[in-house]
Amino acid sequence: MGVLSEHVIEEIRGLPAQFPDIRSAVMPALDLAQEHVGYLSPEAMSEVAELLKLDPGYVQGVATFYTLFHTEPVGKHRMYLCTNISCKLRGADDLLAHAMQSVGVGGQSEVSADGLFSVEAVECLGACEYAPMMRLDHSYHYDLTAEKIDALIAERKNVLPIHGEVPAKPAEGPPAAPAKPARKRAAAPRKKKADA
Amino acid sequence: MPELRGTTKGPVLTRWFGTDNLHTLDVYEKLGGYGAMRKALTTMNPDQIVQEVKDSGLRGRGGADFSTGVKWSLMPKESALPMHLVVNADESEPGSAKDRYLMENSPHMLLEGIGIAAFAIRSHQAWIYIRGEYDGPYERLVTAIGEMKKKGYIGPKPFGADWPLDVRIFRGHGAYICGEEGALLESLEGKRAQPRAWKPPYPAQKGVWNRPTTVNNVETISTVPWIIENGGAAYAKLGTEKSHGTRMFTVSGHVQRPGNYEMEIGKTYRDLIEGLAGGALPGHTIKAWWPGGSSSPVMPGDLLDTTTDLDGVKNVANLKSHPQPPLNMGGRAFATMGGSGGVIVMDESFCMVKAAHRLLQFYAHESCGKCTPCRVGGNWAVRAYERILSGEGGTEDLGILDRIQDGLQAGRCLCGLGDAAGWVIASTLTHYRSEYEEHALHNVCSAEMAAVNATSPLAGRTNA
Ligand SMILES: Cc1cc2nc3c(=O)[nH]c(=O)nc-3n(C[C@H](O)[C@H](O)[C@H](O)COP(=O)(O)O)c2cc1C
Ligand code: SF4
Ligand code: FES
């Protein structure tokens, strides 16, 4: 039994037909796998490789190149705070420290103890006129303040589990990191693995 | 949708902005939209369109200023393989948000431009490569493409013309380098995004999937419908003698009205920053500004009267009394460049060494690792900045930075990312040398001291 369910497998099988070359399907396929599993576990990546008849090393090489692919477990809700220049000029560093403290993570590779959040400092998100800003899951939030961040966190914490859905914990992988106080100095953006 | 921040009812691109539901096909078409595509497909041939765009003088708005009409004319007139138009919607240049503004508010303007451009280069399939974080604009485009298909504007016979058109979207996954044309095509082919060493064959002969390909920026293509509707000559009347038309600027940072502004080329950065964007925050003065994203060399605050003319802005005579940084573009000295139009404004309360450090972190992080000066130099520079900022630096670190900037520029790297990293160091080190020296030699930050004494109007603003 693999980690990808039948409908995801079907969708991935349908991808190559949309492109002149099967390789072009690798990113959309990884995207579907990541949406389904929560992150790109080694199993998820090798299943994608098998479905597309590509070398697993190749698929992993692509996954590790792009920052939106997570090869480690992440929170159910992912906060991507822009810390590049326009946002930094308007206070992004303080907001990053605040967000990390509010959800109780000490670093960018940590997931909050309840499995709900991870926080990542990212490069310019192309909404500099609304700085400071962040992407939370699939939406942008503008003119951020500490209060706005707290409200967004509270909203997500207070959601009652939808029928049948278990409150989020990453599907598998290492246990969530214990809450630590946020670091004093804002962390630099997460490093891309240079030569995978 | 959030509140619109920027020009509405501008001369070309934003002429209909601010109209309710402009993003829908109905509203766009009622205002006159799709008239240009209809005209192109039913009354013109591809060569006439290319000529019209050549006459307009339109130059690419993705940062390299290359003539759009000339680029299109490089495409073969006949090809055994399919040909592609690829729209660069990767917009990741720090300080640049104008492509998002255009796609979010007027997706049909881009799609109409795609219809015309694809026809002009004899392509039946266009791809939009959009950065993965742009969920909103992506949804807008998907919906808009659906509306077009319903009307038949995308399909086997758009406007009755015997010329099938297909438009597809490919989502990026977070990597600045995907904006570089060769890296973008690699990424579209499902590979790690690393720039290609372009020698012949060029993309027009052998681009994506080895097929003839033209890559254009979102703003470039969005301008095309206006040109076809009004004629190349009308567009050429706007702007200066050599840089025609209007362009979008994103103004961000320490200004009163950050936003995306459409302005006629040839006006000055003062018109933009102090006029449209409201100028410095109360009680502050503009210390520095970047004319075209973080990759354009920084300019001192007293040079706001610089022209936005694409050639004029590069003129070293603009620097007047300032020392000229050792900047090299294709073997030539230049002052700065219009780049992507992302204007970043910084006032006296922020430390230039810290700003430069942050930008070098960006370039080091986004280096694709293909060439040594860029892969190694960026990280090396970040470490020098860390030493300088932690009070452990010395004169030797300034020497190291100087050597690194030189090693990154002048064609020593495969793509412009390396040059840009070098330009950040060279331009900030020349114009703000005293700040570097205060940090490196005396462990003092005058900007921070000034900020402590001032009450800042921005909540949560720091100089960390
Ligand atoms: C590092 C780097 C990043 C770039 N990023 C973008 C981008 O995000 N969007 C864009 O349109 N062009 C970008 N460009 C320029 C493209 O390579 C290319 O010149 C442009 O898309 C061509 O379109 P145009 O002729 O319409 O300007 C970038 C170039 C470099 C070197
Ligand atoms: S200059 Fe940097 S980003 Fe460009 S190809 Fe070389 S290593 Fe890659
Ligand atoms: S710098 Fe933060 S969105 Fe551009």
Image (cartoon, coloured by chain):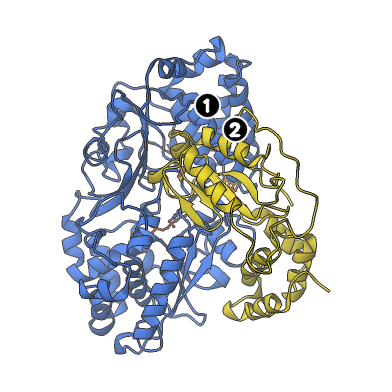
Residue B433's image quarter?
Answer: top left
Q: Report if the beta carbon of the residue with label 1 is closer than 8 angstroms to ligand 3.
A: no
Residue B44 x/y as whole percent: 25, 80
The residue drawn where x is 46% and y is 18% is B448
Residue B370 visible from this viewpoint? no
Q: What chain is colored yellow?
A: A
The residue drawn where x is 44% and y is 50% is A126
Question: Do the dots labelled 1 and 2 sit on one chain?
Answer: no
Residue A12 x/y as whole percent: 67, 76
Mark 1 crowdedness (10 Å alpha carbons): few <14, some 14-19, many ≥20: some
The numbered mark 2 sits on a residue in which chain?
A
Above or below for A102 versus B155: above
* Residue type beneath disc 1: Ala
Question: Is residue A12 found left or right of A93 in the rendered image?
Answer: right
| Contact between labelled residues 2 and 1, with CB atoms less than 8 Å apart | yes
Question: Is residue B237 found left or right of B172 in the rendered image?
Answer: left
Residue holding disc 1: B464
Residue B216 x/y as whole percent: 41, 62
| Count of numbered tags | 2
Q: Residue furthest right?
A: A1
The numbered mark 1 sits on a residue in which chain?
B
The label shown at residue A186 is 2
Residue A195 x/y as whole percent: 72, 49
* Residue type beneath disc 2: Ala
The residue drawn where x is 45% and y is 72% is B142
